[in-house]
Every structure is written in C-alpha cells, then in structure tokens.
Amino acid sequence: MNIYLIRHGEAEPPLGTKAHELRELTKEGIEAVKASAEFWKKFNLSFDIILTSPLKRAAQTAKVIHDVLEVEQEVVEAISLLNGGLTEELLSIAEAFGMNEIAMVGHQPDIGIHIASMTGSSNTNFKIPPAAIVKIHFKDKPRIGQGVLEFLIPPMNKKG
C-alpha cells in the first residue's frame, strides 16, 4: 500500500473576519496545485481515492488534484486529517478502504508529524511546503513506524 500525504495549497492569510475553516486557496495556490498535479502525471502517479481534511482549503486542493488526475472515486472527507488527528486513525482508515494508492490532503504541522510517525522517524521534524507530496510505502499492512518514505516532491509553479 502507498499513502501519499499532500499539504494543501497556499491559502488566504488568517486575517480579517473570515472563519479559519473557510479560508480558501489563493489564486497562486490553485495554480501551484494544478501545476504540481500535472507534474505528477509524468511519474504515472494515480490514486484510487483521495481523502481530505474538511477545511475549505484542503477540500479545494483535493478537488483540483481529483480533476487533474481524473480520479474515479469522489473525494472523501476525513476528520482525522484535521490538525490534531492521530496517525493511527489515518492508517486504520487507509486499511479499511483496502486500496493500494491512497492520497490524503491535510495541514502542517500534522502532515510532518504523520510522515515521522508512519516512517518511525519520531525525532524528525518534517516541514513540507504547500502543494508538496510525500509517498510512503507499506510492504504489508500500514502500521506506525513501518512505512518507507520513497519521495518528497516540492510544489511546482506554472513554469514547471
């Protein structure tokens, strides 16, 4: 099983009267997510399903990726991808779906925490930029500390 952890694209700053949950992707954020997903096609990257945090910016990111990569399954919200969600819960969800290529769109610092937990690198601080993707491979069932980090691809800009 492969789990792909994706940080949502660049979002509006947390200023003004807009609720934290409703902050949207910026125009540049949308463009970076599209460019990144287009770049991933060069590696024949595809997902059986995309799970997303329910926050608007993550859901928007998941939708862009879904459309660019033409994922058959609809995007599924997973509360465990909100900040504070447990890695164990994400692994249980992944196992329950029984699919091989599972993308998960979430937030920092939790994406970094999940990478560390899945790969057994708990003393490592993974800080990934918006619209970046990490692939973690599990030989057998997905378990804490049993994943192998196979790649981290930073975000692309329109120029590639």
Image (spheres, rainbow, N blue to C red):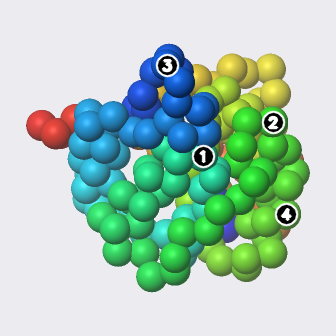
- Which residue is drawn at the image coordinates 64% and 51% (left, top)? 53
Say which of marks 4 and 3 sits in front.
Answer: 3
Lower position in the chain sequence, tag 1 or tag 2: 1
Give the position of the C terminus as an image quadrant. top left
- Which residue is drawn at the image coordinates 44% and 52% (left, top)? 60
Lower position in the chain sequence, tag 4 or tag 1: 1
- Which residue carries the number 2 mark? 84
| Mark 2 and mark 3 residues within 8 Å of each other at the beta carbon | no
SS under mark 3: loop
26 shown above or below 31: above
Say which of marks 3 and 1 sits in front.
Answer: 3
Three-letter amino acid code at disc 2? Gly
Three-letter amino acid code at disc 1? Leu
Say which of marks 2 and 3 sits in front.
Answer: 3
Give the position of the N terminus as an image quadrant. bottom right
Cα separation, mark 2 vs mark 3, equals 24 Å
Lower position in the chain sequence, tag 4 or tag 2: 2
Cα separation, mark 4 vs mark 2, equals 16 Å
Three-letter amino acid code at disc 4? Ser
SS under mark 1: loop
